[in-house]
Image: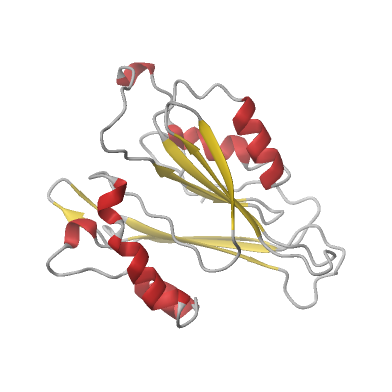
Amino acid sequence: MYPIDPVGGGTWVGVSSTGLALCLLNLNQIPRPYLPPPEQLTSRGLIIPKLLGLSGTAEIARVLRQSDLDFFAPFRVLAIDPPRPTDEGGSITAIEAVWDRLGLRVRRLAAGPLCLVSSGLGDTLAAPRLALFDRMLSVHGATPVAQDRFHRQQWPDRPEISVLMARDEARTVSITTAEVVWADGLAASSRHPRVSMTYEGLVEGAVASACVLADPDAPAAVAV
């Protein structure tokens, strides 16, 4: 399941019925790399729908390494594969794949509260959000309440780099939340957790949600 950008037809976040979660951030480098003319570029929003049907982070890394990325602007893909109930002592597996027009770099991330930031002004300018995340979530716990509070944070004197960003030509327009849970009562051998997603439009106040229960025949993705 994933929200769909009505302009480009792609998405920036998605989760499959197996619990694989993906997020795409634009990579805004300073100085900016050379890019082909816009009409020669492929929308980065098409990346996640093509990856959601894969089996996990290892296969995602392999597919991205084998892909021709020359017609994409720079991006970062975050992929998170939760532990299965049958994995004794298993833990979350997370990777970050970075395409900067020079090459693809893939690194494994430590499990636990994690924050990646992106800004059209330049990603380094949004770095203060990382320290804020550490203060609000990593130290006191990444509870749902703390996460909601973080995503609605805005510095009065720095709205252009705040989490709830606002500047003359752009602003944060939505908050999307995905949850993957092996709930009580689901068979330990089940391959499919309970997956839910909520999209909240901040401009028009629209809210959409969807849920896929544990079901071996559930579709890999449901648009919301």
62 sits left or right of 48 in the view: right
Residue 1 location (% of width, % of height): 58, 50
Q: Quadrant of residue 188?
A: bottom right
97 sits left or right of 122 in the view: right
The image shows a total of numbered marks equal to 0
Image position of 210 with respect to 16: above or below: below
**At 68% from the left edge and 60% from the top edge, which residue is drawn?**
82
**At 44% from the left edge and 21% from the top edge, which residue is drawn?**
71
Instruction: Say how the picture is coloured.
Output: secondary structure
Along the line of sight, the residue nearer the viewer: 188 or 207: 188
Residue that lies at the very extreme toward the bottom in this rendered image: 140
**At 61% from the left edge and 64% from the top edge, which residue is drawn?**
111
**At 28% from the left edge and 32% from the top edge, which residue is drawn?**
32
Report if residue 73 is visible in the image.
yes
Along the line of sight, the residue nearer the viewer: 33 or 223: 33
153 sits left or right of 110 in the view: left
Residue 145 location (% of width, % of height): 44, 80
Q: Quadrant of residue 159?
A: bottom left
Report if residue 1 is visible in the image.
no
Residue 186 location (% of width, % of height): 80, 71
Residue 29 location (% of width, % of height): 31, 38
Q: Quadrant of residue 152?
A: bottom left
